[in-house]
Image: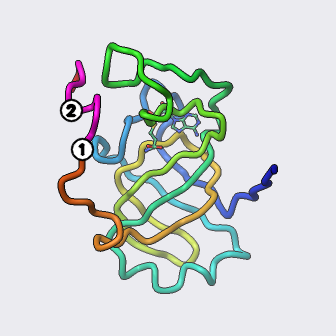
Amino acid sequence: MDFTFTPIGVIHSPFLDKKDTPIQPTRSRAAGQVEVFEEYATGLEDLEGFSHIILLYVFHRSSGFRLKVQPFLDSRPHGLFSTRYPCRPNPIGLSIVRLVNRRGRWLDIEGVDVLDSTPLLDIKPYVPEFDIRTGARAGWFENRSQE
Ligand SMILES: C[S@@+](CC[C@H](N)C(=O)[O-])C[C@H]1O[C@@H](n2cnc3c(N)ncnc32)[C@H](O)[C@@H]1O
């Protein structure tokens, strides 16, 4: 089965180069904007009540993938699917960012970890009851070689 997704918008960010881009929202204070295309704007209603949103997007400037990679914060290789490495068979990224403000079909966000012009696939509200897991383990990340 193949699937075709059409972007619903674009993520605007200050980052033009991968090496300057933060590796996760929790390590970023950068501001950005989400532009949702006009035809999807009505779907943003009621989003402003949420402090955080989940962005799903395409790593449009990645190419190819390897199944063992050395992730950003460790010197040892790990299986791709135990990492957040951007080069993946389906190059989909997920970022939980702070929603600062909604201006119509534009969202001001903080905690950006994506390149400018990243194509946006979906937005979901971050809901603590659904999304927080107490006692979660973080595998190799708990013994990583870098902070
Ligand atoms: C480690 S990934 C984590 C992204 C996301 N928070 C996740 O967990 O799926 C973040 C890195 O991906 C790279 N990146 C960000 N946006 C990209 C894009 N549109 N295309 C290709 N690489 C991108 C940058 O090097 C950035 O530092």
The residue beneath circle 1 is 137
Label 2 element class: helix
Q: Residue at x 44, y 36 (%)?
A: 84
| Quadrant, the C terminus | top left
- Which image quadrant is residue 21 in? top left
Query: Residue 13: horizontal and vertical position, in percent?
Result: 49, 47
Q: Can you see residue 22?
A: yes
Q: 84 or 52, which lies in front?
A: 84
**Is label 1 in contact with label 2 (beta carbons under 8 Å)?**
yes
Residue at the extreme top of the image, as rendered: 75
Residue 84 appears left or right of 147: right
Query: Residue 143: horizontal and vertical position, in percent?
Result: 20, 25
In the rendered view, tell whether residue 144 sits above or below residue 3.
above
Find residue 58 and name its label: none
| CA distance for labels 1 and 2 | 8 Å
Query: Residue 110: horizontal and vertical position, in percent?
Result: 36, 56
The amino acid beneath tag 1 is Arg
Residue 27 appears left or right of 78: left
The residue beneath circle 2 is 142
Task: Nearest to the eye among marks 1 and 2: give it.
Answer: 1
In the rendered view, tell whether residue 71 sits above or below residue 48.
above
Label 1 element class: loop
Q: Can you see residue 100?
A: no
Specify the segment rendered in magenta: 138-145
Q: Residue at x 53, y 61 (%)?
A: 34
Query: Residue 9: horizontal and vertical position, in percent?
Result: 65, 61
- Which image quadrant is residue 133 in? bottom left
Q: Residue at x 36, y 82 (%)?
A: 49
The amino acid beneath tag 2 is Glu
- Residue 139 is one of the magenta-drawn residues: yes
